[in-house]
Amino acid sequence: MDSVNSSNRQRRRIAAIDLGTNSFHAVIVDIFPDGTFSIIDALKEMVTLGRNGLGKTLRPADMNRGIEALSKIKTLCDSYRVEKILAYATSAIREALNGGAFIQRAIDEVQIKILAIPGKTEAELIAYAVQHSLSLVDQRALIMDIGGGSTEFIVADHAEHYFLDSQKIGVSRMSADLVSSDPISKKNIQLLEKEYDKALKSVDEAVARFSPTFLVGTSGTMQNIASMIAAEKQLDTSVTLNEFEYSSDDFFAFYSKFIALNRKKRLQVRGLDDKRVDFIVAGLVLVNTVLKKYRFSTIKTSTQAMREGIILRYIKQEMKDLKLLDQYPDTRTRSVFELLRKCNWHEDHSSQVTRLALNLFDSLQSYHKLGDNDRQLLEFASLLHDIGYHISHKKHHKHALYLILNADLKGFSQEEIEIMAHIARYHRRSEPKPDHELYMTLTKAQKDRIKALSGILRVADGLDRSHYQNVQELQTEVTADKIEIRIKTLGDAELEIWGAMRKRELFEKLFKRKLTIRRVN
């Protein structure tokens, strides 16, 4: 979803890493609130983890190569200040007897957490990418992604996934197991075709049921085949290989010549990535098998694959958070609202309490003499004061303390987070006491701010005791010994006045005056 980057647009920068059998692909993107993304940089590292065969033990040299590749990717991510890294491992790591050890090394040595995903998840991610990169309106396609360890098959149109499957017939696996001659012998081809026929049983049923009309090829093997056919036909693909189309006759003509070449002569073919020279033959035999079996006349190429699918699924899952980028460009505000949304906050009540608390703060500022930062901390604490309901109604004020302290709020210092958490904690029930352990670890300056701001919050919360937003307007009048709050309400005000007056002690200590509340409409 490449889009024009704009310095005025809020964005989130992430990296997606596809840890394949032969190569690790990373892409760094900026994601915008409208769901578009812009590619910032990309890196591909050949690692050939499956050269010892799949489902076995990764050799130390293979693991070291993989960790070194991840280290380069991490350095690139750090240089771009990437906020989040999504790293998904496929066959080679998923099936390796020591795949878990490799994943742990990635955490310990590179600080990248890898998720080993199942084959059907691979297929789903690939489907998202192809739907995004190709025009599939009113067309169903069989999508084939030939990897090193597995091959994914998908039947999809522009909007739906009708079939998702993953088979263990990747080119590294098949080359290691069934290709023993160079150039490949007829016997080896027959062994491959027999294995492919067995693996394609579920695809046979899907093609019969959903009737795709053409084949889409994506990822390295299929892109290499497309590049070689384009080069042979003297077609320019220097701008993009995406949507490049060739016929089954083009493929069969190319196949008949290429399959007879040995390694040295294959390396001379334009369009072939040298690092795929040992695996490409098994891929060609698979494509040949699929085209003959399903009689597709057209093959299209997608340059987007699993790593773009990772991004697209992330966008799909995070759209609500991404929209907050536009609504709340300030890091602090956005971080607070992300927490509120996660905790299913009581929006109407919390917004009303915040409005009342800020009204009290502003109208009495010349008496409490607190600053702008205190006002903002009061605002956020007021919005957050009831999030403890997300855990339990009982002791929800204490749950709010825990949630705020452990939410990893962005843009705040630890001191500020502690202040907000304690303001929320003391919005009800008891005032701060010497036996409150967390409170007693705070500095005197923090304690003073907490008592002052929670005093204001307690009265504001009481003024919405009904949770009905009854108070419409609020004014204050200050005399030498009294603060009078005058309220205009929709209906009877007894409950709101009672709610505020029963929690007035910290408020009165702050202002050194008695509090009275009167309805004036």
Image (spheres, grey):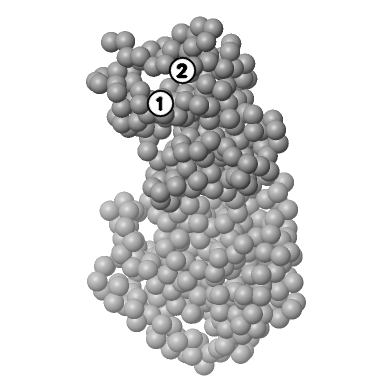
Please tell me whether residue 1 is drawn above or below residue 373 in the rendered image.
Answer: below
Q: Nearer the viewer, residue 385 or 510?
A: 510
Which is nearer the eye, 455 or 149? Answer: 455
Q: What crowding class fits label 1: few (fewer than 14 Cα within 10 Å), some (14-19), or many (20 or more)?
A: many
Q: Which amino acid does label 1 sit on?
A: Ala
Quadrant the C terminus occupies? top left
State the SS at label 2: strand
**Disc 1 to disc 2: CB gap under 8 Å:** yes
Residue at the image position 59 percent from the left and 50 percent from the top: 84
Q: Please name the residue that numbered disc 2 is placed on.
A: 515
Q: Residue at x 57, y 21 (%)?
A: 510
Which quadrant of the view contains residue 485? top left
Q: Can residue 90 be seen in this view?
A: yes
Note whether residue 261 is visible. no
Q: Distance between the residues labelled 1 and 2?
A: 10 Å
Q: Residue 500 carries which label?
A: 1
Name the residue rendered at 57%, 88% in the picture: 177
Q: Nearer the viewer, residue 305 or 72?
A: 72
Relative image position of residue 153 (x, y in whole percent): 40, 70
> Earlier along the polypeptide chain: callout 1 or callout 2?
1
Q: Which residue corresponds to the image point at 54% horizontal and 83% vertical from the top-left?
A: 174
Point out residue 320 in the picture as x, y percentages from the top left corner. Answer: 42, 42
Disc 2 marks which amino acid? Leu
Label 1 element class: helix
Q: In this view, does 379 lie above or below 148?
A: above
Q: Residues within 10 Å of mark 2 (few under 14, many from 20)?
A: some
